[in-house]
Image: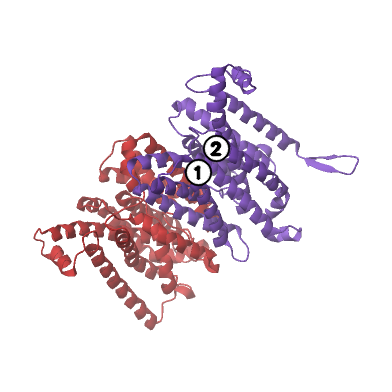
Chain colours: A purple, B red
């Protein structure tokens, strides 16, 4: 931890290790993106990809890179970043490493909205995304309202989330049994989370949302860190506890819902990214930026792995992240047990 | 009985005054009557409505008429619901006492999901098609996930929140696996999308025959554990001082919960919240004494499950709603209500 001071009396704190980790993760995510653009039925060397991205490739490569594959990779990066950030916020607010939005029902709530559109209205892709967004927001609002009782306490918030999750799972199961077979297959692929066939239409809304929300979140990062010490301690330090929580929860819900709308409920990125980032930076607190970059890297690498291992577009990326989540849970089990914490 | 000389229970579980004991006994009789009513409703209500006379005729003087065939189908469905309901309620009560956790439920802790993942694995990868084959997978899955959740939730220091979170996270991981199987195997998807929501509709007489021995052992084991579980509720040290065998009690409780959840899930898919709700409702009028909670839970859980099944048949006639969906739709609000109540943290 270093503090940089100017002569004018301004100062900024800089955690060197965190800064290095963030830089490395961003580099890894971008490199992964370039490799991912080059991967597919028509392989393109990384150097050509970079050249084409800067507008100097031939027409054929230009079409493949900028029209077909770049938007997909951008959606992957943005979704990963949004999920990582949303997960870090939720885990910090819930004060529990397992309290991520996908465990607490936001993913399932958004899925319920999307399935409703697929099964009942046979809607277009854009309408499905809209349904997912609305579903996620409604779930988030319900979670807050139901957990409210003179303030939102961590454990009540978690348990209400689990209850809503169960409810949404039942609703999704019902919708799935109501569907005819074609819709059911479409719904199951959507429910797993996939980047296949994403184009610029999905990139822009997500990008604008991240651009708007990121400064808001970063501005509240310090109060959030105080909040982790408990409501009373935070009050004593002058943090507007409930307001901070409402603002940050709103941001996290929006980020998660928008990411789900763009790519489906990609599971476990929100759960694992903040924890992995925390292990890398070795710094306490919510680790918002590292978690965000870690999410983007994770999703891109998972998508690349799913294409490399199983062939192009055979398995949606959500399956890979799901396996990742299972491994993470086991790892948590082993390490926490060794450390004597459980 | 596992405890030779019954421990002198605490004030809460002290032998009730005679009047209250009579009242509780009468309550048991009332529950049995309620169960009988629900059983009759479950046989009579459906796409084809039957009168009570037709039900009587079908059950006792079966002469092969159309109504009699319908009754026959519904009787096996009702019997299965009866067994599975009892199994889920008892396992919920045992798990709540074992983990000293008011929010323990075989569905919520992921145990049912563990059993169903194992069953799906058996169907999809090992080509097992008969219930008698995959019921063993279900037991293995239930047992493994039960132990995992307990460890992940932090064995001794397990709080309701940590256990529930660990269960939900494991459930999410397992359902991701289920989805992967369903995506790669379209035939499996068509079969499993109905099974994984939990349904009684596939009940046949041989289904019942195959799970009956396991469920019977599990139910008897659970009912026999009332006294040791009462001792366990007072804390490890006190229980040991009172002469209860802690390890044996824990192992037997876990075995009975595994048998009950595994067999129930193998027969009709994962069903949530029955094991959570019924013991809570029961505890509100029996108090913490397991000797009353267990019989009441055994009688009232099938009332809930069969009631949900009947409701599922009524609300979207002539199609029907799977019972797992109805119990979750009723159970999730009850769960949230329990969480909002102040006393939640204590059992």
Residue A306 % position (x, y): 48, 30
Q: Is circle 1 on the same chain as circle 2?
A: yes
Disc 2 secondary structure class = helix
Q: Nearer the viewer, residue B128 or A196?
A: A196
In the picture, the quarter occupied by the N terminus of chain B is bottom left
Q: Chain of mark 1?
A: A
Disc 1 secondary structure class = helix
Residue B153 % position (x, y): 52, 51
Q: Nearer the viewer, residue A69 or B262?
A: A69
Outermost residue, bottom side: B19
Question: Crowding at label 1, few (<14), some or many (≥20) Cα neighbours within 10 Å?
Answer: many
User: Which residue is drawn at the image coordinates 67% and 59% (left, top)?
Assistant: A242
Q: Is residue B253 above or below residue A68?
A: below
Quarter of the image for residue A20 reads: top right
| Image mark for residue A58 | none
User: Which residue is drawn at the image coordinates 40% and 56% (left, top)?
Assistant: B272
Give the left or right position of residue A182, taking residue B174 as reference. left
Q: Nearer the viewer, residue A280 or B346?
A: A280
CB under 8 Å between callouts 1 and 2?
yes
Q: Earlier in the sequence, mark 1 or mark 2?
A: 1
Residue A63 % position (x, y): 54, 22
Q: Chain of mark 2?
A: A
| Image mark for residue A129 | 1
Residue B262 appearing in the image:
yes
Give the left or right position of residue B81, taking residue A134 as reference. left
Give the left or right position of residue A74, taking residue A217 as reference. left
Outermost residue, top side: A58
Residue B159 appearing in the image:
no
User: Which residue is drawn at the image coordinates 38% and 43% (left, top)?
Assistant: B117
Q: Tell me the residue that label 2 is attached to.
A: A202
């Amino acid at each position: 931890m270093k503090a940089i001071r100017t002569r004018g009396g301004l100062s900024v704190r800089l955690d060197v290790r965190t800064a290095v980790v963030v830089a490395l993760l961003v580099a890894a995510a971008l490199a992964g993106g370039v490799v991912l653009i080059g991967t597919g039925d028509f392989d393109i060397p990384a150097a050509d990809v970079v050249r084409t991205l800067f507008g100097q490739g031939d027409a054929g490569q230009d079409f493949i890179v900028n029209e077909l594959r770049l938007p997909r990779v951008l959606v992957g990066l943005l979704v990963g970043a949004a999920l990582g950030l949303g997960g870090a916020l939720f885990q910090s607010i819930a004060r529990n490493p397992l309290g991520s939005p996908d465990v607490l029902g936001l993913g399932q709530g958004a899925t319920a909205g999307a399935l409703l559109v697929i099964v009942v209205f046979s809607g277009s892709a854009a309408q499905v995304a809209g349904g997912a967004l609305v579903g996620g927001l409604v779930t988030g609002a319900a979670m807050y309202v139901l957990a409210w009782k003179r303030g939102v306490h961590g454990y009540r918030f978690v348990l209400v989330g689990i209850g809503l999750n169960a409810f949404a799972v039942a609703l999704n199961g019902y919708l799935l049994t109501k569907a005819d077979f074609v819709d059911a297959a479409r719904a199951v692929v959507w429910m797993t989370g996939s980047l296949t066939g994403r184009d610029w239409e999905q990139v822009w809304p997500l990008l604008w949302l991240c651009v708007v929300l990121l400064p808001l979140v970063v501005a509240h990062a310090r109060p959030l860190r105080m909040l982790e010490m408990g409501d009373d301690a935070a009050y004593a330090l002058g943090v507007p506890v409930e307001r901070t929580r409402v603002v940050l929860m709103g941001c996290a819900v929006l980020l998660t819902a928008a990411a789900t709308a763009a790519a489906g409920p990609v599971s476990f990125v929100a759960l694992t990214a903040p924890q992995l980032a925390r292990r890398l930076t070795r710094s306490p607190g919510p680790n918002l930026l590292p978690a965000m970059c870690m999410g983007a890297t994770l999703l891109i690498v998972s998508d690349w792995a799913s294409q490399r291992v199983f062939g192009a577009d055979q398995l949606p990326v959500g399956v890979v992240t799901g396996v990742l989540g299972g491994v993470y849970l086991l790892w948590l089990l082993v390490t926490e047990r060794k450390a004597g914490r459980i | 009985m596992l405890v030779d000389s019954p421990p002198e229970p605490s004030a809460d579980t002290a032998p009730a005054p005679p009047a209250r004991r009579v009242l509780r006994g009468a309550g048991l009789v009332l529950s049995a009557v309620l169960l009988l009513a629900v059983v009759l409703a479950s046989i009579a209500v459906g796409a084809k409505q039957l009168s009570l006379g037709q039900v009587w005729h079908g059950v006792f003087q079966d002469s092969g008429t159309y109504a009699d065939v319908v009754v026959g189908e519904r009787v096996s469905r009702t019997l299965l619901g009866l067994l599975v309901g009892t199994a889920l309620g008892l396992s919920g009560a045992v798990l709540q006492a074992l983990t000293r956790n008011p929010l323990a439920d075989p569905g919520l802790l992921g145990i049912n999901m563990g059993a169903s993942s194992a069953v799906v694995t058996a169907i999809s990868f090992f080509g097992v098609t008969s219930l008698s084959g995959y019921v063993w997978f279900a037991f293995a899955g239930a047992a493994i996930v039960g132990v995992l959740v307990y460890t992940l939730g932090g064995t001794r220091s397990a709080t309701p929140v940590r256990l529930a979170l660990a269960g939900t996270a494991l459930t999410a991981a397992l359902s991701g696996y289920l989805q992967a199987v369903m995506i790669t195997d379209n035939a499996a998807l068509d079969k499993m999308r109905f099974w994984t929501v939990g349904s009684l509709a596939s009940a046949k007489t041989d289904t019942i025959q195959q799970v009956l021995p396991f469920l019977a052992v599990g139910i008897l084991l659970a009912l026999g554990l009332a006294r040791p579980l009462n001792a366990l509720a007072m804390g490890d040290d006190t229980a040991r001082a009172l002469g209860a065998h802690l390890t044996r009690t824990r192992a037997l409780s876990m075995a009975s919960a595994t048998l009950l959840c595994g067999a129930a899930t193998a027969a009709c898919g994962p069903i949530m919240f029955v094991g959570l709700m019924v013991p809570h409702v029961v505890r509100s009028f029996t108090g913490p004494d397991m000797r009353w909670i267990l019989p009441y839970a055994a009688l009232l859980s099938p009332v809930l499950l069969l009631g949900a099944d009947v409701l599922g048949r009524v609300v979207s006639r002539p199609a029907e709603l799977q019972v797992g969906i109805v119990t979750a739709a009723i159970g999730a609000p009850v769960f949230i209500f329990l969480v909002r109540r102040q006393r939640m943290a204590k059992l």
